[in-house]
Image (cartoon, rainbow, N blue to C red):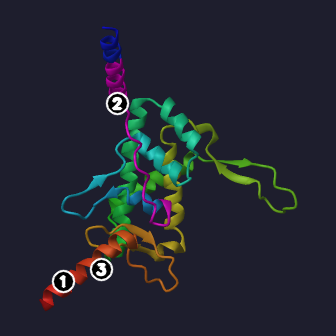
Amino acid sequence: MLALDKLRVTCKMIFMGYELMSGIKAAPPAFDLCGGHPVLDFVNSLDKRFDKDGPVDLLLDYTDVLRFTAQTRLLGQRHGQLLARSVTAGAAAGALRSARELREALAALFYGNLDGRPPAASVLRALERHFHAAERHRELRWRPPLPDTTGFTGIAWQWDRFAGSAALPVWILSQAASQLLLSDETQRVRACGAQTCRWLFLDTSKNHTRRWCNMKVCGNRMKARRFQQAHRAYA
């Protein structure tokens, strides 16, 4: 009887362990940062944008926005964890909506430019609102310059008074976007050659001939497709 009771206890412990393990959520996958710039990777966070089975939004909640800004080093990981614990559900939902609005305005601008279409006035106004919001919440701060340096090296934009706002990652993304759009780097923005993908990337190749967001994914897939089509033609 003692052996049977021991068996029952053991089985119960195993079952409880299974229940606990099955309740553990798997860590979300890291974002694919093949775009070469945080802003382009941000636009790519709406996956399968041009796929008939898409799109797939990789920003499902506010914590995904925080994960993205942490992975791209726009926001410190500890700061992101603090925001995840401290902001209200309503503020987090509003920041998520704002992030998605910024992303889609950027997407409309970039893809329109690549396709030879001027941006709609509504797209420019949306970006303008986000850029102004970021500017309003930045403050100049002075930090003592490092030894053996000259000039005003200690001046930097900071978010100190607004560091606890749920909108902080959106403002940081807006600032990065305005810097990119007003730079010469926009001339190197390309879209993946796979029409069902078209992820954006910054072409830093020597001859500016990069065609794929990721050669191992879209590049190999398109090469295999051309190979199959060629063999069917000669079959």
Residue type of the residue flagged with mark 1:
Gln
Where, quadrant-wise, is the N terminus in this rendering? top left
In the picture, measured across the screen, residue 132 lies left or right of residue 146, that is left
Q: Which mark is residue 223?
A: 3
CA separation, marks 2 and 1? 46 Å
Name which of mark 2 and mark 1 comes first in the sequence.
2
Q: Could one spot residue 117 in this view of the protein?
A: no
Residue labelled with disc 1: 229
Query: Which residue is found at the position 28% from the left and 76% from the top?
Result: 222
Name which of mark 3 and mark 1 comes first in the sequence.
3
Viewer-side residue, 126 vs 58: 58
Considering every residue shown, the one lying at the far left of the view is 235
CA separation, marks 2 and 3? 42 Å
Residue type of the residue flagged with mark 3:
Lys
Q: Is residue 28 above or below residue 47?
A: above
Q: Quadrant of residue 235?
A: bottom left
Residue type of the residue flagged with mark 2:
Gly
Magenta stretch in the rendered image: 10-38
Residue labelled with disc 2: 23
Query: Are the residues at dot 2 and dot 3 in contact (C-beta closer than 8 Å)?
Result: no
Q: Residues within 10 Å of mark 2 (few under 14, many from 20)?
A: few
Residue 226: x %, y % from top left: 24, 82
